[in-house]
Image: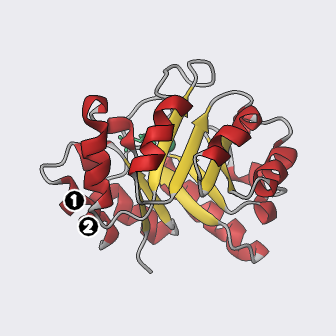
Amino acid sequence: MKPIIAPSILSANFAYLARDIEMINQSEADWLHLDVMDGVFVPNISFGFPVLKYVAELTNKPLDVHLMIVNPEKFIPEVKALGAKVMNVHFEACPHLHRVIQQIREAGMQPAVTINPATPVSFLKDIIDDVYMVLVMSVNPGFGGQKFIEHSVEKVKELRALIDQRGSKALIEVDGGVNKETGARLIAAGADVLVAGNAIFAAENPVVMIQDLKNM
Ligand code: DX5
Ligand code: ZN
């Protein structure tokens, strides 16, 4: 099975966002990954819903919205209004994760839970049957272009084992420092979805890079 490729526009040129989204439209990318940051949950601010409204109008790819914010449940209506397919919330930002997951599903979106590098896979045992996807962060969230944390490969293997053992259909997504080399190892470990920002936007030919990631 080929991986699902989700380019992250965090590494796009925001002054030429329409151009960069059109490049992704023309590529073999499967989803568009959108990184919302609040400067509280993570030490950076990216873009918010007024910007994403126009991104959603321009793209022809399903939206994978990754909320690196506190109280993400407050923004379920805004994410829904974008027409998003997947709404990713952080495990560390949701003391009532089970309720938030239900609310996302009730809003008609696919719920995903994201874990930071220091959060163990075992913490997902009681939520794995309720989520569409788990996003394993392979860098500390907040910035594009960071170095891949090697331990993430082991976490993906562990998560694959948990999912298979439970007979769950949850997808495994990985985000941070993904390129052709780390991506190949993540797929071998059991990942289904690869997010990539810097590897795509810094490539000489981003469309070819997306194609290479898709066909590894
Ligand atoms: C990081 C974001 C990522 C980021 C990945 O906090 O969640 O989606 O765009 O960027 P790269 O692929 O450059 O590590
Ligand atoms: Zn992300």
Q: Position of residue 117 (x, y in %)?
A: 57, 40
Residue 95: percent from left, percent from top: 83, 35
User: Residue 104: where, in percent of width, then height?
Assistant: 76, 51
Above or below: residue 11 compared with residue 155:
above
Q: By what rule are the colours in the image chosen?
A: secondary structure
Residue that label 1 marks: 207
Q: How far apart are the alpha carbons under marks 2 and 1?
A: 6 Å
| Residue on which disc 2 sits | 211
> Could you tell me residue 145's position as x and y percent?
33, 36
Q: Work out which residue is located at the far left of the displayed protein and give it.
A: 204
Provide the secondary structure element on which disc 1 rests: helix
Point 59% across, 52% down: residue: 83
Badge 2 vs badge 1, beta-carbon distance below 8 Å: yes
Residue 114 in view, yes or no: no
- Is 135 rendered above or below residue 77? below
User: What amino acid type is highlighted by mark number 1?
Assistant: Val
Given the image, on which type of amino acid does mark 2 rest? Gln
Residue 135 visible? The answer is: yes
